[in-house]
Image (cartoon, rainbow, N blue to C red):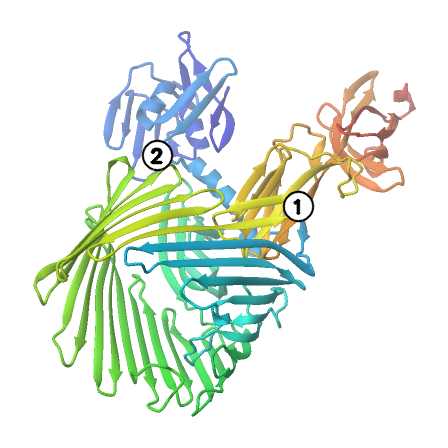
Amino acid sequence: MIALKVQNVGSIEISTLINERQEVYLSVPEVFDFLKIKNEHNESYSVIDGFFINENNVFHIDETVHTICYKGKFIQLQPGDLIHITNNLFLKANHFNSIFELENTFSFRDLTISMSSSYELPSVREARLRHMRATIKNIKYGFIADTTIRRDKPLFHFNNADWVLNTTQRSNGINQEQLRLGLGGIIAGGEFESSFNYINNQAILSRNQYYRWRYVNNDDQYLTQISVGKIANSLTTTIINPIIGAHITNAKTTARRSFGTYVLSDYTKPEWTVELYINNILIDYTKADATGFFSFTVPLLYGKTDVLVRYYGLWGEEELSTKQLVIPFYFLPQNKLEYNLSSGIIEEDKKSLFANAKASYGLSDYITIEGGLEYVSSIEKNNFIPYFGSSIRLASQLFVSGGYYSKVKYTGNLNFSSPKNIRVDLDYTKYDKDQEAVRFNYSEVRKASLSVPMHTSLISGVSRFTIQQNFYPTGKYTISELAFSGMVYKQNFNLITSSYFTGATKPFVFSNLSSSLRLPKGFVFTPNIKYEYRAAEITSLSAQLRKKVFKKGFLQASFDRDFKYNTSSMQISFQYNFKFSNTGFSSNISKDVVSFSQLANGSLIFEPSADFVEFSGNTTIGRASVKFEPFLDINGDGKRDIDEQPVKGVEVTVNGGTKTLNPKEGITIITGLEPYVKNLVTFSTAKINNIAWQLKDKTLNITLNANQLRVIEIPISVVGEVAGMVQRRKNGQITGTSGLKINIYREDGGFVTSVLSEADGYFGYLGLISGHYSVRIDSIQLQKLHLRVESKNTHFVINNGNEGAIVDNVEFILYQDDTERN
């Protein structure tokens, strides 16, 4: 017997033969059974039939004629390559590689054989799926962390800033300088953002500046956000200038994800394992019953949802089926109410008053209704605009919606997606001829679009056709576009044909054809051609050449030629992303003017309380940051004292953000996280070189503020170990006894934990903080076994210090009566 090891699966002992030439023979049925390869043998084990991974890869091994037939090909073996003994058949190890591509290496030193394959073996796939299925609980029910840290609410705190500088010099003397300075912080527990904008040839006006205070509580279902300052625009009325006011809502800051559920049921082969994937993530799995029936409760997600069902047979067979679902974001789950209330003053000469209110309600999983009211004082007629709308799901992928804005307009929309991902969108808007709220001069808008995926052996992509008609009192204007984007002969292409129709002139139709070609040395060449059909000629050409340089730099040159207007231009630009800032310049040369531009932008996080300053090229305003500081908690109080040293080697994992490490201090800083949501954090102590240093809480849910770097101290406890022996005295001999329950207690009698003795009687437990302890064998177990105990050193002291402590002299001697005691 030797150990067969397969990466990502494990090991097992299998029957093996080794001849005098040290050639290794492996048991075919035992190897294939461990790898989950389908195999069946005759009564004498001289013939084995099955298939390798795929049902089409049939094999037939026949020891009587020394042949293997695999994938329809006969392989003649030497007489000694197959060895048949009672109830087993052995094949020389090198043939597992040459025939089945099962690479293997035998080690005489430790009598193990390591095996691997370039294919995903059924056993490897089973291990991978087993690991994926182990994570389903977190996906279905949420991440259950060892501890939770909620966000704090500082009264006054500022630590984020960003900046943008853009300058342009022109040969005609018209130069321009633009500067933007942003500041982010916290006031009264709420997020504050502001920006100052300066342009050299414009006056500094209040409407060009931005400021907003926002309080967020995603756990409150009635009032989630309160905003004061520059707020969002209206639902209906065309408002160009900013609005200064307030806004409240119960909508969460995170995008809506889950809409509801529906039941998916079907039949497959009996006892097959069935897995459900949503957007390529394993959500659930089950086993079909004796008739092959199975069912899932499928979560419906907003937007496009890809549903994939995989079927796995008992011997690695695999089948799949797919479908796609679409839920528009304007639908709400049943009985869900969402509202928005806004009021303010428009920054214009009239200082018009503005207010609106909107509420949406999920009447059922198929119907969402909404209504509201908007008021703008500057509108002379109809300055109160009531609104009502609804959205209906007529079929699984057929949606209609409509809205009526009193004396302004009414709208309608139809959206359909077929099982083959063909999409149809129809939009219609009709304006009241006397309305003043919407500042357009057309009276009616019709729009339709059709999207069709294209997949052949040579072409793969999506084609889209859109058409829009704008009606005016004096006529109409029609715009259409036919576009294809995808791969043709393994090369990407984009072809867009646009047309403009009016009643008075001939249609204006042109096409743009572009591609992107990857050249040697990392160059990317992008040509573009414009063709006008009325003139029946190419009217313009352009080309762009790009290359990444110096790891974080980008060099680009382009040339444009317009034959219609007889103009040419050339541009060259360079951008480099430093760690602390993004910089770049560009130069444009044309017939009439030469210009030169420079651009730089960056951000700053300044957190004195965390001893942290960072300059970055990415904006940090509105984002959250966190600093993790592991320390050695010598006294076990969970708080860091002056004399408690940092601990190196704790690995921190968070989804999202940018990680910065300080290995000397063991510190991990993560910036750019989403605020107001539960960030899932995991800690690993695998790289800490002292087993006495242990972390109690290895998973964490933490909610962070925007514009703040939160410091989280991670206490690493110093723990000690108690160990000893449980032995049985019988007939004058002492032997180790397994399965005995040993209870550990604190000095005050508080229970700590229990451990079981091993096969040789040894027991041990690592995890005791400094203090006085005692250990006892479970009295109930002793009574049931009718045993008595003699103990030594059962009361002990753990004094861990910095390195931990061990007490390993505890002894328990078991005996049945006084005759065995001595």
637 sits to left or right of 528 = right
The residue carrying pointer 1 sits among few (fewer than 14), some (14 to 19) or many (20 or more) residues within 10 Å by Cα, namely few
In front here: 616 or 398?
616
Label 2 vs label 1: CA separation?
Answer: 59 Å
Q: Amino acid at mark 2?
A: Phe
Residue 261, image x and y in percent? 49, 65
User: What residue lies at 65% left-to-right and 27% top-to-bottom?
Assistant: 689
Q: Which of the image's four quarters has the C terminus? A: top right
Residue 243, image x and y in percent? 50, 75
Q: For numbered disc 2, what is the local secondary structure?
A: loop
Q: Which mark is residue 368?
A: none
Residue 231 higher or lower than 39, as above or below: below
Q: For numbered disc 1, what is the local secondary structure?
A: helix
Residues tagged 2 and 1 counted as in contact (Cβ below 8 A): no
In front here: 737 or 490?
490
User: Which residue is labeled 1 in the image?
Assistant: 610
In front here: 538 or 216?
538
81 sits to left or right of 154 = left
Which picture quadrant has residue 749? Answer: top right
In front here: 344 or 442?
344
765 sits to left or right of 791 = left
Residue 534, image x and y in percent? 9, 67
User: What residue lies at 59% left-to-right and 66% top-to-bottom?
Assistant: 214
User: Which residue is labeled 2 in the image?
Assistant: 52
Q: Amino acid at mark 1?
A: Ala
Residue 747 higher or lower than 679, as above or below: above
Q: Nearer the viewer, mark 2 or mark 1?
A: 1
User: What residue lies at 40% left-to-right and 13% top-to-bottom?
Assistant: 23
Point out the tag, 2 or 1, that comes first from the N-terminus. Answer: 2
